Image (cartoon, grey):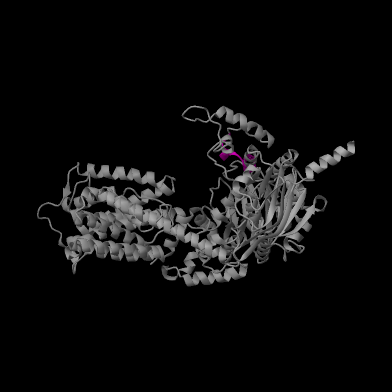
Amino acid sequence: MSKKDLGLLLLIIAVGIVVAIINPRFLLPINLANTSNLIGLFGILSIGQAFVIITGGIELSVGSLVAFLGVLFIDFVAVQNMPWPIALPVILIVGGIFGAIHGWLITRLNLQPFVVTLCGLLIYRGAARFYTADGTAGFAFGQNFPDLEFLTAGRFYGVPNTFIALVIIAAVMWIVLHRSVYGRYLYAIGKNEEAAKYSGIRTAKMVMIAYVICGVLTALSAIYFAMYTRSISPASHGQFYELYAIAAAVLGGFSLRGGEGSLIGVVLGTILLQELQNLVNLLGIPSSLNFAVMGGVILIGVLIDQQWTAIRARRLLISAARRPDARLPAE
Amino acid sequence: MNQRSDTLVSTETTAPFLSLSGIGKTYPGVVALDDFSMDVSPGEVIGLVGENGAGKSTLMKILGGVVKPDRGTILLDGAEHAALSVESSIASGIAFVHQELNLFENLDVAANIFLGREPLRGGPLKLVDRRRLRMMVAPLLKRVGANFSADTPVASLSLAQQQMVEIAKALSINARLVILDEPTSSLPLAETEKLLAVISALKADGISVIFISHRLHEVERVADRVVVLRDGTLAGTLPKNLIDHDRMVKLMIGRALTARVAEAHRPPGNVALKVTAIRTAAYPTRPVDLAINYGEILGLAGLVGSGRTELARVLFGIDKNYGGSTALDGKDVKLTSSTKAVANGIFLVPEDRKLNGILLDLPISQNISLPNLPVHAPRFMVSSERENAAAEIQGKRLGIKAPSVSTRTGTLSGGNQQKVVLAKWLSMNPKVMIFDEPTRGIDIGAKNEIYGLMRKLADAGVAILMISSDMEEVIGVSDRIAVMHEGQIAGILEKDKFSQENVLLLAVGKAIH
């Protein structure tokens, strides 16, 4: 765990203690379970986003995708009577295909990630609304899918299964990002795509895979969100979720220029965001201030991080100057 | 009468307007400059040479007022200063043209020259008076012999032209001393000539020039006097009649340089890479034919813009090839991506080290392992022990000077960074290695090490293609020289035909005798 991650963890604990002191309901099992459920839902989404941000890209369409894929999933299962063990992988594949299309447009046709995914944001939202004719997609009364419901909205010894899913996904993705060859390639591409290409790395393919990973994880969280709300009004479902995901990554130490950030960081970022949401509710802050609190905390967090980096750089410079073999910066 | 006026003229031109004496600067743990003295007279061109770390930067920073010396005095127009400030340096007419140009490519020439000092029209909006701006810029451009106009976008200028803009900028603040830091290191031959002409023009106007360069033959041509720095001290001063390459090198490194590079130890072998009618994006109508043999260093000379780097990029699979074929060991290979080139044992040491060669933020070990990462990742996971071990071996083999293999690559000197780029490839059994300007911005000691490594590789059977704009390098290192002119191979010189003149003639599209 890096110092940055550790700092974030301490902040989460400190905020938690303060909230618990002011309102002890924070520590009630039901509150913790609810919050960790939300952490699971948003965490999976944010990890996908993190893979894209590492490459120096951005994925703005995830909120709309959560709506569109959610609508599709509920329609498949509740209306088309498709067995859910088939519908689930189908949705994951569709998410992956959307990711692949984004990656293809970005790497092969050299469009900017912001532009491509902004168009995605608009298109998928429109598609979701068109698919249900702007109606609400949901399960009919009495429709039950006990296994699916247990896996998506159930609890295991009181721990929400979404949170367990997040832990498993985070562990796998941690290995992919921090230990695998692919993860190393992603960091190299994020730092300097040209140099990576000059080292013989298929940069376009690697970036495309990052968008596919993001698409698949978004599809998975879309299913979780659908089963969590159980009914989807496609005009508003998932709105701004891309911003939650980006915010979690930024809080977790990711640089939007790419090449920086850790998986633990983005998970902690998600936890802090959900804790703040919870704080707003528990401390009786008007919920209209929800976004303002989030924005303020992110801004302060980024500021502190930036100042901290500057101080460290200065210290490094001083210690380098003291080293006997130190020279001036190369001529 | 005549005699008297002559003496008058000569005292006028030799009375220094800037004089440094006993200058010293110590940083914690290192003496950057010690007891250094130098005079600058009006209209004098001083060549300042020395290896990297010899103290040139510190000296420049002192003249620019950025760094204050600990000892010594600076005499400027008869007034004694312990140190200059940035303001007093500018006010007294000291101007810098840095190696990395500080121009805004998205603005035009005039805007760059008068940035922040634009003539304004009256009124509350303070709009830029574009007409007056152009009128102010035109004479400056004329003085530097520019063949472009004030409203040309800087992005469309060549490097030498951009330097002219920088010099015009210096003239616009009435510079009396222009300090050129490595101005020719990235210039092609013809452009270098233009720059040297500008220096002569400055001199004729009575403006002094300090010309810092690693390219000694250029120093030899323009300098009235050469000042040599070594380890922060004045190693010697050479008056005009004593300036020559060997003396400078001797002073710079404290000993005479022996043979620049070892001769080939064995005759070249079979054809490694054969290029037939390849066409590049830069010259899509001009086919290139070239064959590189195992065990030889084939120099690729030519003016910048003659299509050499483009050829290298096509061979390494970075750029698309617009026709033609490549054969490795007599078998056709399609080099459609850098991945394929690497898989075939064709490696490139790129021209722009910091942009393409290495990842500055990564440690040395991770840079070295990057192209060969799967080898260091048994069972899917990258093993840092393996990476570090491999990096240690390569570091020792190439003599990379760094505290450890986990040192950030960006903190290394240019020569050591270049060795890291080499180390990336050497562990992977190269067949063909393409070096694009392998010693740009590298000091003489490290240069010779790189040459030695190239020769060792060639002796081990590797086919080497060396693109270089440095004439001494091309002639001193190559076994054969291919010269490019406007996208095509103009001719290939065997060893007995090697001469600066022949290379130049082919490079400008003429036949050799």
A329 and B268: which is toward the camera = A329
The x, y position of residue B401, in whole percent, is 60, 67
Q: Residue at x 59, y 43 (%)?
A: B282
The image quarter in which residue A131 lies: top left
In the image, taking residue B419 as reference, residue B370 lies left or right, namely: left
Q: Residue at x 67, y 64 (%)?
A: B449
Residue B333 visible? The answer is no
Q: Give the residues in magenta.
A: B152-165
Along the viewing direction, whichever of B154 and A28 lies nearer the viewer: A28
Q: Residue B159 colored magenta? A: yes
Main secondary-structure element of the magenta-colored stretch: helix
Taking depth in this image into account, of A125 and B126 the one nearest to the observer is B126
Query: In the figure, A112 relative to B273: above or below?
Result: above
User: Is B316 in front, or is A166?
Assistant: A166
Residue B264 falls in image quadrant: bottom right
Q: Residue A41 lies in magenta, yes or no?
A: no
- At a point 33% along the width and 51% down the height, the residue shown is A97
Q: Is residue B301 left or right of residue A177?
A: right
Q: Position of residue A159 (x, y in %)?
A: 21, 66
**Residue that protrudes farthest toward the left in the picture:** A142
| In the depicted structure, whether residue B161 falls above or below residue A163 | above
